[in-house]
């Protein structure tokens, strides 16, 4: 494989051979290929695309650039991947819920960047919670508890780490084949045999339209199935925030509410729906209806909460010490009476970032207590002066800076609005 010929091949719209693609990924992983050649190839892929077969080979080669886990357990392995969105805390109640349903969930998660939150940051709101476990400890907790949630290790899909960094600075992030290979290489390496994808679309998501979300979901499903996994996908609406909280500790609290059989209806419903997809695809239940009934029971009878507490204790979390509390909180009043007709998820995500709940650089610090709480949802009625939400931050100045934009993110109407379904499609 001659690097410049390989780049020219994709530049001209031709298909790579499997041998050349695997050699190319090996060069990325071992450092023999320079960044400028990798960057040129990334742009060629962005402009010309890849076939389903090429995407599957690229994914498999990236997965095999590091350690590949396998579990020999009496319960089937399954995991979920979300493309991220405002208020998306589903992984926190979902993993222990699935453990309570008899699945093993080896979940490797990420951190937030920009306006979308990260599962690892949310978990680290819990005092002492360790997401930096080694693979042996990860395996042990999955086997003993049924679920474990950690960050990507240095030895899992190392080729993806280098490609991801270069995509971020070369304008090639919005490429379906590259997104697919990045997501799938890590998920396949963690060892789950069943994968369910929550692909989000709308203002508060990476994919802005349902059609684009469907294209990504179809690519993820095709690649996973080509590589021997059982896969399903949901397309979910992220034009509005998910739940009533945005921010790390706030979202942990809401997740605990869901695990206690309470919490916002939309968060509970999506958690149950994804658990049912995972459990039926993995063979634990014959129908989605049976799996959903079992999932609701596990939330209501405490078994899902018990699994979360067991995982938390195994990962050194001290849940009983409580969660961080913001130094300053202030209500955002409704400017008039009416029904909440729309809530701009992107605008609220930007506000949460400004309040300190997010980061603009990978190594930046965050305020785990900051964010937005008690969000009104579409369809709810409010009187003039009553709170649309509660802002939480370290200083009054941070709150003053976003108050007007947050108020403007809520559109009110005189009549109850139509409410679009949260789950738009099942694939």
Image (tube, rainbow, N blue to C red):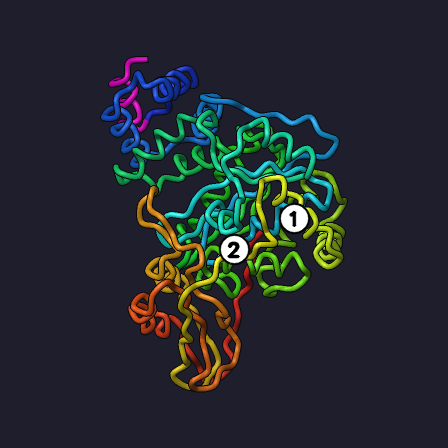
Q: Which residue is mark 2?
A: 236
Q: Residue 99: in sight, yes or no?
A: yes
Name the magenta segment's main secondary structure.
Answer: helix
- Please provide percent x and percent y for residue 225: 57, 32
Question: Residues in magenta?
Answer: 1-13
The residue shown at (51%, 39%) is 131
Label disc, if present, on residue 378 of the rendered structure: none
Label 2 environment density (alpha carbons within 10 Å; few <14, some 14–19, many ≥20): many
The residue shown at (48%, 37%) is 151
In the picture, measured across the screen, residue 198 lies left or right of residue 257, that is: left
- Please provide percent x and percent y for residue 413: 44, 81
Q: Is residue 400 above or below residue 104?
A: below
- Please provide percent x and percent y for residue 102: 73, 41
Residue in the foreground of this view, choosing between 335 and 321: 321
Residue in the foreground of this view, choosing between 146 and 368: 368
The residue shown at (30%, 33%) is 166
How many labels were placed on the picture? 2
Q: How many angstroms separate mark 2 from mark 1 (CA)? A: 28 Å
Q: Which residue is mark 1?
A: 309
């Amino acid at each position: 494989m001659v690097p410049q010929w390989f780049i020219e091949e994709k530049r001209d719209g031709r298909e790579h051979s499997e041998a050349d693609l695997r050699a190319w990924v090996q060069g990325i992983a071992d450092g023999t290929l320079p960044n400028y050649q990798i960057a040129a190839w990334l742009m060629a892929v962005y402009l010309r695309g890849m076939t389903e077969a090429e995407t599957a080979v690229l994914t498999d080669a990236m997965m095999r650039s590091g350690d590949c886990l396998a579990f020999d357990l009496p319960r089937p392995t399954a995991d979920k991947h979300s493309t991220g969105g405002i208020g998306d805390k589903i992984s926190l109640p979902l993993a222990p819920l699935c453990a309570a349903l008899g699945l093993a969930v080896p979940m490797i998660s990420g951190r937030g960047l920009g306006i979308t939150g990260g599962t690892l940051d949310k978990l680290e709101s819990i005092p002492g919670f360790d997401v930096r476990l080694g693979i042996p400890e990860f395996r042990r907790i999955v086997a003993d508890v049924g679920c474990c949630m950690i960050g990507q290790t240095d030895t899992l899909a190392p080729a993806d780490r280098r490609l991801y960094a270069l995509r971020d600075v070369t304008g090639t992030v919005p490429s379906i084949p590259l997104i697919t290979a990045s997501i799938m290489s890590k998920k396949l390496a963690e060892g789950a045999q069943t994968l369910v994808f929550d692909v989000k679309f709308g203002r508060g998501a990476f994919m802005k339209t349902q059609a684009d979300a469907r294209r990504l979901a179809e690519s993820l499903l095709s690649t996973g199935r080509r590589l021997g996994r059982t896969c399903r996908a949901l397309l979910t609406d992220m034009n509005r925030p998910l739940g009533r909280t945005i921010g790390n500790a706030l979202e942990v609290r809401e997740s605990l509410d869901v695990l206690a059989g309470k919490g916002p209806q939309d968060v509970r419903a999506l958690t149950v729906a994804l658990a049912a997809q995972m459990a039926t695809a993995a063979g634990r239940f014959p129908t989605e209806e049976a799996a959903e009934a079992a999932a609701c029971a596990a939330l209501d009878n405490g078994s899902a909460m018990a699994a979360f507490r067991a995982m938390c204790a195994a990962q050194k979390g001290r849940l009983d010490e409580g969660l961080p509390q913001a130094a300053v909180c202030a209500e955002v009043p409704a400017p008039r009476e009416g029904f909440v007709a729309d809530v701009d998820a992107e605008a609220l995500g930007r506000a949460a970032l400004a309040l300190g709940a997010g980061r603009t650089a990978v190594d930046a610090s965050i305020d785990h207590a900051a964010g937005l709480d008690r969000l009104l949802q579409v369809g709810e009625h409010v009187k003039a002066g009553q709170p649309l939400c509660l802002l939480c931050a370290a200083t009054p100045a941070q709150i003053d800076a976003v108050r007007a934009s947050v108020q403007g993110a809520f559109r009110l109407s005189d009549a109850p609005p139509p409410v679009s379904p949260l789950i738009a499609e099942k694939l």
